[in-house]
Image: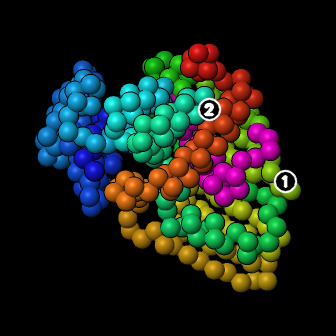
Amino acid sequence: MKLGIVGTGTIVEEVLPVLQQVKGLSCYGICGTKRSEAKAEKLKEQYQMQLAVSDYEKLLDSEIDTVYIAVPNLLHFEMAKEAVLRGKHVIVEKPMTANERQAEELCALAKKQGVFLFEAITTRYQSNYQFIKEQLPTIGKIKMAVCNFSQYSRKYDRFQNGENIPVFDAKQAGGALMDLNLYNIQYLEGLFGEPQSVHYTANMEKGIDTSGVAILSYPGFQAVAIGAKDCQGQPEYRIEGSEGYIAQNSPCNVCGAVTIHYRDGREVSYDGNGDAHRMYAEFVSFVNEIASKDTATCYEMLDHSLAVSRILTRARADAGIVFPCDEN
């Protein structure tokens, strides 16, 4: 994989050292904005890339075969679509798109063009998450699931002081639901599928949800997803069944150690993630799927991304949160 990176923000700075460890992947170039030209050039030199540009077209015209898009949410769809139309494989940071309509169009286009499309969602690729999926039947009939990812944002104070922050801007498809709570929704959908109904109640500031609670109703049980960027809380993931419960006390984007507490007093603990960075497993999978032309796995993951996009779109509608792209 010859990778072109779009964006110079925090997530790019975090992933670049990880990408150096992935076999079969080389970082060829990076694209920033006019304002971030100096930073893009610095990252290019630091990680020995061939290209640093502020023009997306120049990156697409280069020797890259895959694009990694890590920019504000509202830009995901158009930038991914352009890359797909140019025959490039695409890895796009979560959320894949801002709404259900865009997700359906992008997935259909990628299949038509014969390119791979991935949503970068770390949870689904972790060994611990796979362990939870495998062990679900052992706790009997599911009755309740609770997910809490509450993390005080470093940018929240700036937002309150009047600064325009993309993650707190409905015009840029921001908000707590589309950021931290999205991980919770991905976690639940991957385990239980699409719910029968979705309700979202949010704490709103300046037209955007800074925190909120989503209730996903499944046949016979309820799942609660709490996501907050305006307060801090202990991460808690608990799936409760008739024969025991599964507990995880780390954010689900990390998906740390798991303990199963059975009703008969037995406990089973598991931590198969090792010391690898949370983003390592997903990029290893992306490289391997492209190299082996494994479209089946790619399309299976896209089906999950589409389901999550439908859930998020329904949740926003329930709370009255509207993005500009919803009206197109």
Residue 169 screen position, x and y as percent: 53, 23
Task: Inspect this view and state whether residue 250 appears.
Answer: yes
Mark linked to residue 219: 1
Q: Which residue is nearer to you in this view: 263 or 82?
A: 82
Q: Amino acid at mark 2?
A: Glu
Measure the alpha-carbon separation of dots 1 and 2: 23 Å
Q: Dot 1 lies on which element?
A: loop
Q: Residue at x 86, y 56 (%)?
A: 220
Determine contact: label 1, label 2, CB under 8 Å: no
Is residue 201 rendered to the left or right of residue 77?
A: right
Q: Residue at x 71, y 56 (%)?
A: 192
Q: Residues within 10 Å of mark 2 (few under 14, many from 20)?
A: many
Residue 165 screen position, x and y as percent: 46, 24
| Residue beneath disc 2 | 100
Question: Which span of residues is magenta-colored?
Answer: 174-198
Task: Inspect this view and state whether residue 153 appears.
Answer: no
Is residue 205 rendered to the left or right of residue 277?
A: right
Classify 298 as above or below 136. above
> Which colour scheme appears in the figure?
rainbow
